Amino acid sequence: MKKFFATIALVVLPSLGFAAGGSGVELQHMSVDLHDKSSLQRGLQTFTNYCMGCHEAGYARFERAAVDLGIPANLFEENLLPAGKKIGDLMSNSMDSADGKGWFGAPPPDLTMVARVRGKDWVYSYLQAFYEDESRPWGVNNTVFPNVGMPNVLEALQGVRHLTCAQAPAHDENGKPLFDTLTGDALTEEQCNVVVQKTAGQLTEDEFEQVAYDLTNFLVYMGEPSRLKSESLGLKVLLFIILFGIFAYLLNKEYWKEIH
């Protein structure tokens, strides 16, 4: 029994830590829409153009994404397929893991399941949480993932951001203000916020949020490509069970009416 609970703890607790951002940072909420193929297509474009240089999606195939997202094979091959790849290949890259470890401190992780492991809100918040930090090797840090080892590959779109900290009213876990029990004065705590500074990006803030949304939406899809089909099939099964249950009830009632 102890081993059982220990196993549950090892599985569940890390997930809870990821959901909370791992550093006490409040995550931004986003609602995925896997029916929005335009969003998924834009997310795929961002993934292939900005992420696949380092990260793989080695458990997914280009062709499956093209079919599911309604992209003709010829257009996919001309605009989204990396050089040297065939549309039937897995979504891998040519980076050597040893090189990746040398450049980033660890090989860049495979992103096929990142949205399922970390959570959609974590991914969405992480993409927008980079800020300038000259003490880090790549010159950037991240409020959601402190001391992150990767550069901000979307910096050209987002712009350079700076972290500012100031004293702000402290609140408890229920959002109520905290007060000093002796003096009655309101308690404060240091809070940090990321603000645009130095240089603007190619996109406005709203436009970049859309990029982060589309990329997160695509990563959610990639973690479970058959989700929409499963939900549709599940609904049909439930309707069948209800219909079968009605007929079974009426048939049972007919069989036993003479006995009762």
Image (spheres, grey):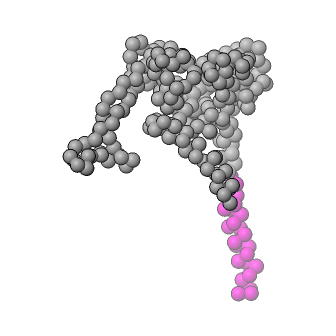
Query: The N terminus is located in which quarter?
Result: bottom right
The image quadrant that residue 196 belongs to is top left
Q: Residue at x 66, y 41 (%)?
A: 227
Q: Is 196 located above or below residue 118 in the figure?
A: above
- The x, y position of residue 160, in whole percent, is 44, 16
| Left or right for 73, reference 183 | right
- The x, y position of residue 108, in whole percent, is 65, 24
Q: Residue at x 60, y 35 (%)?
A: 115
Query: Looking at the image, which is closer to me, 62 or 1?
Result: 1
Q: Can residue 121 be seen in this view?
A: no
Q: Residue at x 66, y 62 (%)?
A: 242
Numbered label tally: 0
Examine the structure image and report whether residue 67 is included in the region drawn in magenta.
no
- The x, y position of residue 253, in whole percent, is 70, 77
Q: Is 227 located above or below residue 93 in the figure?
A: below
- Segment colored magenta: 235-260
Magenta span: predominant SS is helix
Examine the structure image and report whether residue 252 is included in the region drawn in magenta.
yes
Query: The C terminus is located in which quarter?
Result: bottom right
Q: Is 251 located above or below residue 121 in the figure?
A: below
Query: Looking at the image, which is closer to me, 118 or 221?
Result: 118
